[in-house]
């Protein structure tokens, strides 16, 4: 069933993305997609709608909490999200940040977990708390009639959690009980392995939870971590919907004004990842698989990298959606898969570029080759002028749809805030996209999809696909806990 | 993922669930009125039903064209055909080249999709307001003159087979949906899955596709909904221009199969799943079709059992007690006998018997003692919240309007469904629980992980392998 006004997802840098490359013997004729047949008979409006996003009202409290309120009266719903820089990146102990975030809603100094649940459900609200890499998040949404009580609950849960010990036990039980499901899901395995391959054993890898780490979390550690990390400096509170900003900010000052900042701002752990120099095939055997989940991955850029703009265009051409080369070639022409795409994530640390498809086991080799051919082609030649123009028009043209929901409008503002982009970023964005040249696209393709840098991830019926994948690089196997089985090669780990 | 030519089981069965504004329940706080979707409906002379719902708050337009054809219209030996055909609808028509549909919409700022369920096939586009005419052109061109070719069929057949592998065969619990259909429904029309079997997909011919197109893809078998930022005059003119000349065709065969109201005895099935790592239990009851008072009462009952958070009836006895990892209930509204579905996600080594006995005890408790006013009030506010959320995006609006028009001949249900749900009393809920939630009227399916099953299978029923390889 549908979720009411979407709550911002936890602060995971959404993995989307991709491309990369390895040495290939040149693009074979058959590998070039036949392309779209354009009859050009459809009535198309030439102009692209110019779009300006409404800007939220911005307040900064004396404790440096930043508050963004976007008033939108179309639908009587409100979504409130508090994001605190208390994700797993800032936590020395594995699983502690996750547990702390999750249990926030399970009791406060004045209310039991049960009372909170009842208050929330009586409003028909959704309350979610949790921690991703960067942020711990408290999100609540409901009909706007309940805006004030929603704020009260959010502030209480974020600032005055009691971390009841029985709820911690309950959390541990549930998190551990859910672990086996991760091991059977090809997508979870592929993501976990991509994290390991790109980020090694650093916190950026978002490693699969380990039972012993979950069990080791204590109530005392949660209280200490909450006290240290849940601070208003670096935090944002967003309110969107059918609300009155004046009333909101007055209430926010009452509830969160006395929240004490920490002496030092949180500091990101070091995030320099040496580029790989040779392609390795990273394989997890998943017996009973009917398809191989293929993923091609490489470390790419931070959100504020100037390459973000040309990479956006390059990704659009390569594989963002049904007009991308990957979809057209690997699905529409070859029929190897239900969908082949690329994408990239660009958080405040180096993100990844990825390309992926689930392909039937028998065509694992040819499908992998088809990906490599497309990566190669991106580097070998600039995109034809028409394809480039179409890609740019696609990117700019989709802006109008953002206006449909206040949540998506606010998300655009928060992208600026969280990545320290200029305030007029979206106003200048179309012109920046327009300025991208074919040579720019080729340059970033070479840089991020270059020879040897791309790593290949395969989740499938091991015995049936190993031989097919051998030609693409040495094979490193992992178990379903994402531990290397044979000794890892120094470069491919 | 950008594209979802989907036919995902239960999610689609559920397509016709909630929507609507305004309340009967009196909460403590002043209730703001929900927005009302305006509805201007008419028919073209060729029988195409048109619904216009203007909304000028964002420069966006959504078009939905819903055909009254789904997998229930398929014949034996051609399962999966309605959905395979849906894929062909994206492959080009007289004035739209192969791949051009994707690129025209994408490059002009649009999104699109198509989905097939047992009961209908829907196509929709959402575009910046100045591209409305493009969407009308694209939908009309393929309704009038689809390019059905052997090459397109062969290619999309492979794509759909991959879709089947990805969603059914390579996924934990992938076989559960198909087995549920076989167990729950009694007629061929509803018993087979929308994705179909590999053999039947392989058997489909170009001639089948041409015949299917001529039979079902006709204006008198479709509903067109335009929602969003358009001028009515221009919209009507465009609809007349592009869809007006498409001829009506009679002779649409009726759906072959009337589902019996009652199961006529309890059914049980145990599956072993090679990809699952945790057990799962699904329970179905045969209930009233969607759009009926009983259906609304069952929706309220499901909401009371499930809850939105931890206050649902099933939570404490099943989830907090660790008998289950999760427990949910939902009424899946269809145009025929509809499933009331309960699902328990179970932990490794679960005491399944005890979990099921506990579930049964909770069902009996509702039948014996009904639900409280407090629970009812909570269910109402949750349903109102859902209803309001459906009125935000034009694509959702278009989809609900089309569904309500096609299924119940009542597009205004988008505005009134919540008041119907809010009118449900505690007595109604107890009555439908007593009427439908009986053992003789139930089907229970248990999925065991293959490995666990081997060690613990003694005493369980025979695993049914079937498509689960």
Image (spheres, coloured by chain):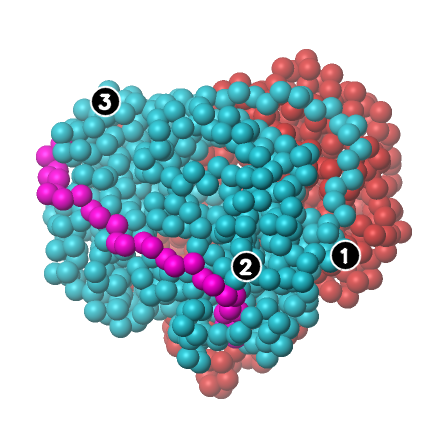
Residue extent of the magenta highlight: A257-286
* Disc 3 crowd, CA 10 A, few/some/many (<14, 14-19, 20+): few
Image location of residue A128, percent across then percent down: 32, 47
* Disc 2 crowd, CA 10 A, few/some/many (<14, 14-19, 20+): many
Are circles 1 and 2 on residues that touch, CB within 8 Å? Answer: no
**Chain letter of disc 3?**
A
SS type, badge 3 = helix
Specify whether disc 3 shares its chain with disc 2: yes
Image location of residue A276, percent across then percent down: 45, 62
Position of residue B328 relative to residue A396, above or below, is below
From this viewpoint, is residue A183 visible?
yes
| Viewport quadrant of the C terminus of chain B | bottom right
**Which chain is assigned cyan?**
A
Which residue lies under the disc numbered 3?
A: A247
Distance Cα–Cα, label 1 vs label 2: 22 Å
Quadrant of the image occupied by residue B379 = top left
Front residue of A18/B76: it is A18
Q: How many labels were placed on the picture?
A: 3
Position of residue B340 relative to residue B358, above or below, is above
**Chain letter of disc 2?**
A
Left/right of residue A395 with respect to residue B406 in the rendered view: left
**Chain letter of disc 1?**
A
Image location of residue A293, percent across then percent down: 56, 64
Which residue lies under the disc numbered 1?
A: A30
């Amino acid at each position: 069933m549908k979720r009411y006004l979407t709550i911002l997802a936890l602060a995971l840098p959404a993995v989307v993305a991709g491309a990369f490359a390895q040495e290939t013997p040149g693009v074979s004729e058959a590998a070039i997609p036949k392309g779209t047949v354009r009859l050009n008979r459809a009535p198309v409006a030439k102009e692209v709608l110019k779009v300006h996003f409404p800007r939220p009202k911005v307040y900064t409290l004396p404790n440096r909490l930043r508050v963004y309120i976007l008033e939108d009266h179309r639908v009587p719903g409100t979504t409130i999200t508090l994001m605190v820089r208390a994700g797993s990146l800032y936590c020395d102990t594995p699983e502690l940040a996750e547990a702390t975030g999750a249990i926030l809603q399970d009791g406060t100094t004045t209310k039991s977990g049960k009372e909170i649940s009842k208050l929330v459900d009586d409003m028909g609200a959704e309350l979610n708390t949790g921690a991703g890499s960067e942020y711990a998040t408290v999100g609540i949404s409901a009909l706007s009639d309940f805006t004030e009580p929603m704020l009260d609950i959010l502030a209480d849960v974020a600032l005055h959690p009691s971390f009841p010990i029985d709820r911690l036990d309950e959390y541990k039980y549930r998190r551990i009980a859910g672990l086996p499901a991760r091991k059977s899901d090809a997508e979870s395995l592929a993501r976990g392995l991509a994290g390991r391959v790109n980020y090694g054993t650093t916190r950026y890898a978002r490693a699969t939870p380990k039972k012993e780490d979950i069990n080791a979390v204590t109530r005392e550690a949660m209280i200490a971590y909450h006290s240290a990390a849940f601070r208003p400096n670096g935090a944002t509170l967003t309110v969107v919907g059918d609300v009155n900003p004046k009333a909101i900010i007055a209430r926010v000052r009452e509830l969160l004004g006395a929240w004490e900042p920490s002496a030092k701002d949180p500091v990101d752990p070091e995030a320099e990842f040496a580029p790989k120099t040779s392609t390795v095939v990273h394989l997890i055997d998943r017996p009973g698989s009917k398809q191989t989940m293929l993923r091609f991955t490489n470390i790419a850029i931070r959100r504020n990298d100037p390459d973000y703009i040309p990479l956006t265009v390059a990704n659009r051409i390569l594989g963002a959606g049904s007009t991308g080369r990957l979809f057209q070639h690997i699905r529409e022409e070859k029929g190897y898969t239900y969908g082949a795409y690329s994408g990239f994530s660009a958080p405040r640390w180096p993100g990844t570029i990825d390309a992926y498809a689930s392909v039937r086991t028998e065509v694992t080799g040819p499908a992998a080759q088809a990906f490599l051919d497309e990566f190669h082609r991106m580097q070998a030649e600039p995109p034809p002028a028409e394809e480039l123009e179409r890609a740019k028009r696609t990117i700019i043209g989709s802006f109008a749809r953002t206006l449909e929901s206040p949540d998506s409008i606010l998300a655009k503002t928060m992208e600026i805030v969280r990545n320290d982009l200029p305030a007029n970023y979206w106003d200048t964005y179309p012109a920046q996209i327009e300025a991208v040249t074919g040579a720019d696209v080729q340059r970033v393709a070479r840089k991020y999809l270059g020879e040897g840098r791309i790593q290949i991830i395969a989740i499938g019926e091991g015995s049936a696909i190993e031989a097919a994948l051998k030609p693409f690089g040495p094979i490193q196997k992992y178990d379903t806990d994402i531990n290397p089985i044979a000794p890892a090669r120094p470069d491919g780990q | 993922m950008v594209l979802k030519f989907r036919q995902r089981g239960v999610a689609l069965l559920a397509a016709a669930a909630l929507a609507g504004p305004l309340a009967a329940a009196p909460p403590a706080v002043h209730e703001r009125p929900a927005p009302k979707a305006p509805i201007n409906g008419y028919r073209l002379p060729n029988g195409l039903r048109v619904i216009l719902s203007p909304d000028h708050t964002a420069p966006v337009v959504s078009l939905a064209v819903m055909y009254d054809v789904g997998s229930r219209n398929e014949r034996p030996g051609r399962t999966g055909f309605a959905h395979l055909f849906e894929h062909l609808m994206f492959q080009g028509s007289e004035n739209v080249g192969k791949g051009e549909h994707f690129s025209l919409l994408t490059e002009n700022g649009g999104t699109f999709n198509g989905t097939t369920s047992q009961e209908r096939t829907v196509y929709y586009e959402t575009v910046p307001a100045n591209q409305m005419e493009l969407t009308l052109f694209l939908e009309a061109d393929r309704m009038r003159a689809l390019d059905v070719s052997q090459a397109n069929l062969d290619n999309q057949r492979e794509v759909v087979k991959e879709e089947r592998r990805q969603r059914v065969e390579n996924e934990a619990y992938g076989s559960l949906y198909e087995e549920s259909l076989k167990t729950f429904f009694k007629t061929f029309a509803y018993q087979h899955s929308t994705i179909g079997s590999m053999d039947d997909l392989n058997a489909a011919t170009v001639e089948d596709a041409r015949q299917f197109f001529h039979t079902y893809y006709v204006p008198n078998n479709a509903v067109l909904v335009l929602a969003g930022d358009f001028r009515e005059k221009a919209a009507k003119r465009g609809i007349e221009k592009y869809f007006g000349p498409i001829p009506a065709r009679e002779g649409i065969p009726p759906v072959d199969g009337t589902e019996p109201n009652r199961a006529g005895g309890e059914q049980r099935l145990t599956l072993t799943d090679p990809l699952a790592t945790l057990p799962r239990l699904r329970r179905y009851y045969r209930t009233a079709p969607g759009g009926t008072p009983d259906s609304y009462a069952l929706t309220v009952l499901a909401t009371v059992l499930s809850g939105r958070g931890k206050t649902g009836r099933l939570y404490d006895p099943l989830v907090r007690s660790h008998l289950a990892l999760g427990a949910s209930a939902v009424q899946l509204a269809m145009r025929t006998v509809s499933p009331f579905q309960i699902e328990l996600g179970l932990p490794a080594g679960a005491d399944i018997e005890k979990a099921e006995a506990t579930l049964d005890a909770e069902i009996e408790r509702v039948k014996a003692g009904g639900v409280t006013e407090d629970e009812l009030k909570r269910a109402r506010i949750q349903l109102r919240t859902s209803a309001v959320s459906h009125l935000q995006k034009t694509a959702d609006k278009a989809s609900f309007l089309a569904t309500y028009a096609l299924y119940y001949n009542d597009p205004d249900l988008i505005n009134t469904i919540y008041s119907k749900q809010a009118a449900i009393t505690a007595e109604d809920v107890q009555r439908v629980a007593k009427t439908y939630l009986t053992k003789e009227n139930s089907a229970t399916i248990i999925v065991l992980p293959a490995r666990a099953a081997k060690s613990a299978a003694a005493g369980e029923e025979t695993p049914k392998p079937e498509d689960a390889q």
